[in-house]
Amino acid sequence: MIARLVLALGAEAKIDVVPGSAEYALPFTTLEHALKVESELKMLERRKFGKKSPPIQVAIVGLGYSGVELAATISERLKNTGTVKAINFQTTICPNAPPGNREAALKVLESQNIQLFLGYSVNCIREVYASEDSGSMVADAKEAGGGDKKLVLELQAAQRGLQSQVLEADLVLWTVGSQSQILRLQPPDAPYVIPLNGRGQVETEETLQVKGHPRTFAIGDSAALRDPSGKFLPANAQVAFQQADFAGWNLWAAINDRPLLPFRFQNLGEMMTLGRNDAAITANFIEGLTLEGPIGHAARKLVYCLRMPTDEHRVKVGVSWLAKGAVDSLASLQNAVSNMIGSS
């Protein structure tokens, strides 16, 4: 018999949303997804290398935190060899972000000439092929005669005054929507054993105990908990970190017949990475202060290092970052020297 249980399964990408999204778009929520995206980018870069061909086109659906960070990072990587097209249902990016972070992110996206399609939803994604003879797009690979594969996104205007759009892309990344993995635990013969809300999250008490199951706790994306104003807490790492501390204490308290503590979220601020050496960080305890650019990047790394569980972890991470920084600096120097020699 299990004495106590903690549900901390997190969430998974919800990608089967519109026709073609599950078949042709890549999610970005796990390490496997990141490795797949890296592999696809490398393949596109090899295919285009040294050829007089159109630039690589990457479409990113969703401009929340993940979408914005992806757009900035991929655009920085591709530079002049590719174009990033970013689509968002709302007419603003990162609608839930602090104003300082949102403004810093928008500044970076615009400086990198990322094409923003705000106020649009994706109606469908389909695959076409470029005909080698005419350059036109056809739906059949045989008819194309071995031409390059392309993905076509049909965009529907979600706001008045906008016209429908059709975009082409070599790679589509999907960052919209997620679903709790708790649904996988529901027994088929008794689907309502675990109380869930409409988003598939576990209903919990303030102590993080599952309602009706005092020996079970739920935290992170698995849990549905509201703040004092009645709003759901955001599903992010900061909330999950703080819940883990409370869950650990309450587990000990429950086992030792001590009173359990109600969870209280302390919003410390938010951070975003906006490229290799660029980030934005807003501290909630200093009103109006946003660190951006290289300073924000350094501050973000410092915060992550301090959040490591042990000193050994902090040292390993710090050494790794220093080594990577040295390698990147050397590579930049070599590129600069090569460009100088080539132009002389």
Image (cartoon, helix red, strand yellow):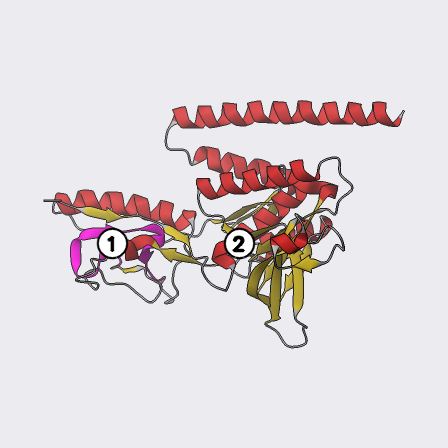
Looking at the picture, which amino acid does disc 2 mark? Tyr
Mark 2 → mark 1, Cα distance in angstroms: 28 Å
Label whose residue precedes the other's in the sequence (2 or 1): 2
Looking at the picture, which amino acid does disc 1 mark? Leu
Height in image: 85 above or below 48?
below
| Residue designated by label 2 | 24
Q: Secondary structure at mark 1?
A: helix
Residue closest to the far bottom: 160
Question: What's the residue at 79%, 24% (across, down)?
Answer: 338
Which quadrant of the figure has residue 326? top right
Residue closest to the far left: 1
Pinpoint residue 10: horizontal percent, then vertical percent. Answer: 35, 49
Disc 2 residue crowd, few under 14, some 14–19, many 20+, Cα 10 Å: some
Which quadrant of the figure has residue 189? bottom left
Which quadrant of the figure has residue 231? bottom left
Pinpoint residue 97: horizontal percent, then vertical percent. Answer: 54, 56
| Residue designated by label 1 | 185
Pinpoint residue 18: horizontal percent, then vertical percent. Answer: 49, 64
Height in image: 257 above or below 301?
below
Magenta residues, start to end: 205-226
